[in-house]
Image: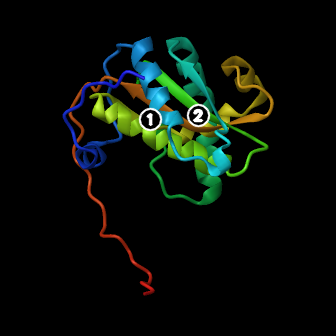
Amino acid sequence: MQLPESEQTIFETILGRRSVRSYSPDKVEANVLKTLLEAAVWAPTAMHKEPWGFVIVQNKEVLQNLSDLAKPLFIEELKKSGARVDFSKYIDGNLFYDAGTLIIICGKTNGHLPVADCWVAAENLMLAACAMKLGSCIVGSALPAMNLPEVRSTLGIPMGFTAIAPIIIGYPDAESAPGSRKAPLILKTIT
């Protein structure tokens, strides 16, 4: 793997990563995607099973159709959970914030801890994207639609795999404001 140039330390990258929700229309190039996927597969994996597979979507029509299908399913899920949410932000617009690239990390359904492995791979991918000056954002609101039979077929997700981590990647259209985090909650220290 040819390493991309980066002048950030790992801590600068961790602290600099943001959920980007505004993108230029440019697609992420194939060589950049290859580097991001390479970073993803170097994630820790339970029993070295590497249960992941990747679907890359760069077709605007497919992304819009998936967004349109996913929005009502997600709103219904929120209503059932009793969440107090402004649903209007999910009705208008595109769930993928008009990003040109969606990477769906899928996991084998018969593996040992595939969900955990795929989420660790997702973090590697997003940190690599940040270090390469790309934006990323997890779009969990699209997940209920991704495992519907007709969507699985469109996306080419084979039997034995399930969609786990949908992540948009692209070139940020605007600066994302830094967030904040609470101090770590230490439940107990045992010495």
Q: Nearer the viewer, residue 11 or 87?
A: 11
Q: Residue at x 64, y 39 (%)?
A: 50
Q: Identify the residue at horizontal 54%, vertical 19% (top origin).
A: 57
Q: Is residue 65 visible?
A: yes
Task: Determine contact: label 1, label 2, CB under 8 Å.
Answer: yes
Q: Would residue 174 be found to the left or right of residue 36 on screen?
A: left
In the image as oriented, which residue stretches furthest toward the bottom? 191
Q: Residue at x 39, y 19 (%)?
A: 32
Which disc is residue 69 wearing?
none
The quadrant where residue 151 appears = top right
Q: Which residue is labeled 2 in the image?
A: 105
Could you tell me residue 37's position as x and y percent? 49, 27
Graded by Cα atoms within 10 Å as few (under 14), some (14 to 19) or many (20 or more), the crowding at tag 2 reads many
The location of residue 103, given as percent across then percent down, is: 52, 27
Rendered view: 60 above or below 85: above
**Residue of label 1:** 125
**Image quadrant where residue 150 sits:** top right
For label 1, count other residues whose C-alpha is less than 10 Å away and answer few (under 14), some (14-19) or many (20+).
many
Answer whether residue 21 is visible to the viewer in this image: no
Colour scheme used in the picture? rainbow
Q: Secondary structure at mark 1?
A: helix
Q: Position of residue 153 (x, y in %)?
A: 74, 20
Query: Label 2 amino acid?
Result: Ile
* Residue toward you, 65 or 32: 32
Residue 113 picture location, percent across and down = 68, 51
Q: Quadrant of the C terminus?
A: bottom left
